[in-house]
Amino acid sequence: MSSGDDRFDGMLLALAQQTGGIEPLLEAIFGFLGRKTDFYKFHKDPKVAEDLVVKVFRSHQDRALQKERHAEEERAKLKAKEALIKQRQEAEKRKRDEEAEQRALRAKEEAARARQAAASKTKTAAASSPTTVQKQADFGIEEIESDEEEEEEVENNTAEAMPDATRAEGDSKAEPADGEDESANTESKGQTPNAGNGGSGPGYTWTQTLADLEVQVPVLPGTRGRQLNIDIARAHLIVGVKGEEPIIDGKFFAEVNASEAYWVLDEGTVIITLEKANKMEWWDCLITGHPTIDTSKVEPENSKLSDLDGDTRGVVEKMMYDQRQKAAGLPTSEEQEKQRIMEQFMAAHPEMDFSQAKIQ
């Protein structure tokens, strides 16, 4: 009977409930073997029966321990992914804050320079005005001409003192055709990518690497996970709250590996992590028909293992090691552990024939 055979679970469960514990259950089973079978005397050496019991016990013990190790690894993988997501979000927030500070500082400096230049030109114009008045008194007909020259000079000085942004605005108004062409080119290429090489859509933002995508969808404070309606398919995504219009409901730009997708609800934001089916292309939008980005401006960043904590780094390094082993056709760390356990068991039972044994 294989370890996965559950045909007798109902009967054994009823027996366990009646006996009231593991030890009484084993007593009942071994008592049955003694009363109704020749289990204890079918071989001249009584140790054969004992070895058989130990063999079956060890087999099921190894499966149970292996299952528990696998569950622990899965929990560690999930913890590692969540830590990576959190670190990425914090890095993006720091970068956005720094960029906002730099923009504000540049705007302040430009405004100060513009005020200083305007004040300097005004002083120059004021210093030259007495001479102009004197000319107007001495030469009546030149009065109008002098006024016109002075106005032209003040206008020129003011134009030179204007900041670059204001002059650019004036140029665009003077040459509407060129401005319209530039605007049209910008729209055709799409938005400038955000710090995570992604963009934004109606009700969400997204970032990407060559291999993965992350989608952030804000929801109302107090929303619980069981209230969400999230469906991730190979080519389609639905995100929303049950009983309401979906926030996202559309076709992906390209296909994803739906079996590798997962999501978490973190402080009022749904964070969805996706794995691209084609890991050699940048997406210009998350959902077909939504705003696009200019992928020519994407700036990929390399992740560093040194940025991770000890436990997370260990899990990531193990995953990378297993990937390299698989690519080289060599056993993974889990398969090596199985082989080690088998070798220990064989060494402890030299009397047994393992020539036909297979490790799965």
Image: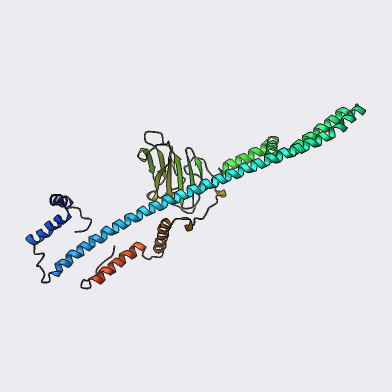
Residue found at x 43% / y 48%: 274
Give how far across and how far down residue 95 sits, in percent.
54, 47
Left or right of residue 128, residue 235 in this image: left
Rendered image coloring scheme: rainbow
Residue 143 visible within the image:
yes
Check the picture and name the quadrant holding the C terminus: bottom left
Residue found at x 58% / y 40%: 187
Residue 139 visible within the image:
no
Check the picture and name the quadrant holding the N terminus: bottom left
The image quarter in which residue 167 lies: top right
Give how far across and how far down residue 34 sits, in percent.
9, 62
Give how far across and how far down residue 189 sits, in percent.
57, 44
How many discs appear?
Answer: 0
Between 240 and 30, the residue placed more toward the observer is: 30
Between 335 and 237, the residue placed more toward the observer is: 335
Between 235 and 211, the residue placed more toward the observer is: 211
Q: Residue furthest right?
A: 138
Between 353 and 32, the residue placed more toward the observer is: 32
Give how far across and how far down residue 15 sits, in percent.
13, 51
Q: Residue furthest left?
A: 35
Residue found at x 17% / y 66%: 52
Residue found at x 63% / y 41%: 182
Left or right of residue 45, residue 304 in this image: right
The image quarter in which residue 263 lies: top left
The image quarter in which residue 232 lies: top left
Residue 144 vertical placement versus 331 (above, below): above
